[in-house]
Image (spheres, helix red, strand yellow):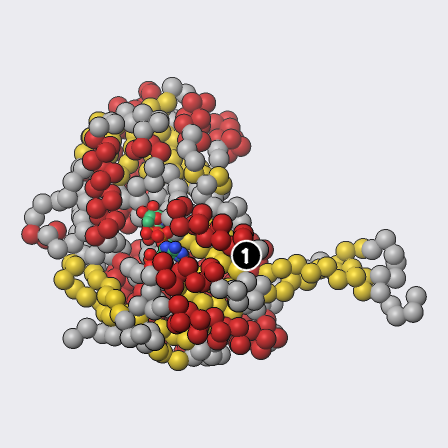
Amino acid sequence: MTNAFRNFVNGRWSEAANGATFQSINPADARDVVGDFAASAVEDVHQAIDAAHEALPKWRNLSAWARGEILRKAADILESRLEEVARAMVRENGKTIAEARGETSRGVALFRYYAAEGVRCVGDVVPSVNPRTMIYTTRVPLGVVSLVTPWNFPIAIPVWKLAPALIYGNTVVLKPATATPHCGVLIAKVLEDAGIPPGVFNLVTGSGGEVGEELVRNGKVHGISFTGSNVVGRRIGVRAAERGIKFQLEMGGKNPVIVMPDCDIEQALTLTLRGAFGYAGQKCTATSRAILLDSIYDLFAGKLVERAASLKIGPGIDESCVLPPVVSREQHRSILAAIEKGRSEAKLLCGGGVPSGEDYRNGFYIEPTIFGDVPAASSLAQEEIFGPVLSLIRARDLNEAIALANGVRYGLSASIFTRDVNAVQEYCSRIEAGVVKVNGETAGLEPQVPFGGMKESSSHSREQGRAAMEFFTSVKTVYLDRAGN
Ligand code: NDP
């Protein structure tokens, strides 16, 4: 018998009103069912939004210090469950246990960071032209906010949205991805045990088409924060703009590394491979293009292929595996289709298929795949594949390398490997990316600094760090005059 999990609405665990369920499965072995989850409908979303609406006045009037106490408890509880949550994440999402532990720790750090935000300054006192007038700015919560999150970081992304939303006084309805509802349930349990008041945080599982749409459409929702694909993100942006509510979209990437001839080759190889194939390339900040200067191209490509072929593919729970399965049958199919298309565009240097052998039969595995001499206009160089696929592109010089790096519609993250300070300065000033690394992996973020993309990678607001305050609050400017004169 499979485990049954429910929505968390108004402080209670409840089934979908129509009793419908869906299953979440283990990507490393599709026969392993994680559990049955509420396949919620519009009625369930209404209940959650109504609960959030009702809970709002009390929550926003609580001191930020008191709200922070709950987040601090949530951090401690999540930390005490770190191994349990990490293992559940591996089972549901497929990532390696090392990545899952790291992500859960990130969730703990985010709760702690935002708990402390409750006692930090939120406004300024600004001199008035009138010496008897005091002008200050302050911030107020948006109200009820919807959070729609993807499967690739099923703990960290919901937490980096909900923790700032809550500390600044908003109430929340979270819809986790259909592929990772159990991680959503685990977050709700942490918040329940931390003493979150009924209605302040609500979890509704179910499909994007039903639950997600209503979370954007509903008139009682005052803001929406989304991470996922560009297609869905753009639609949410249009709907939110029509309703005149605040929205925040974090979407795709086609992240490049530029490899200069004077780089530390060992470092560049290790971090390019890790960026491209760690977590099977399913990070929005994963490395999907390596732009190699002509004079280093053959040497670097040869070593990359040699190393990629030796990466151990296997279930994330096996500590020795570095390349886990991709998250779902749909992603497996779509990545393999992109590879097939790529075969007609460029030279396949390694991988390109499903690994053979009994160990891989029931999971969604794909070999680490590298294409060489990829033309800049091809789909391999332009489209987000979100799998273990790396495109090598030749450049004559730094100038051309930066132009190639910028020649896509995305602008999320980028890196350069070099010892040349002039090249670094040129790249840092011209690269079109929200996250700019030097001698680093394109993936890998710290929670206390802003994160977000340029161009079509985002709606141009930033998440994490203090930047989250910009989204989850509205500014009020107060002119304070004395009575009389
Ligand atoms: P989606 O954009 O479809 O899903 C992200 C979230 O949005 C999920 O919770 C999803 O629900 C929800 N959603 C789907 N449709 C709607 C809708 N009409 N209204 C409101 N919410 C909706 O991404 P996928 O998971 O399908 O992944 C597809 C591709 O997206 C990947 O291959 C990758 O390219 C990109 N992606 C990018 C991510 C990033 O971090 N930038 C993260 C994940 C994916 P449900 O799960 O129920 O469909």
Q: Quadrant of residue 41?
A: bottom left
Percent x, y of residue 4: 25, 74
Is 456 placed above or below 3 here? Answer: above
Q: Which residue is found at the position 18% from the left and 34% from the top? A: 350
Q: Quadrant of residue 328?
A: bottom left
The C terminus: image quadrant: bottom right
Q: Which residue is found at the position 49% from the left and 50% from the top? A: 238
Q: Quadrant of residue 152?
A: bottom left
Is 465 placed above or below 24 here? Answer: above
Q: Is residue 485 left or right of residue 99?
A: right
Is 61 placed above or below 143 here? Answer: below
Residue lying farthest to the left in this orientation: 358
Percent x, y of residue 370: 24, 34
Q: Is residue 59 left or right of residue 368?
A: right
Q: Which residue is found at the position 41% from the left and 27% from the top? A: 404
Pointer 1 residue: 243
Asked if residue 74 shows in the view, the reply is: no
Kindly identify the amino acid type of the residue bearing the numbered disc 1.
Arg
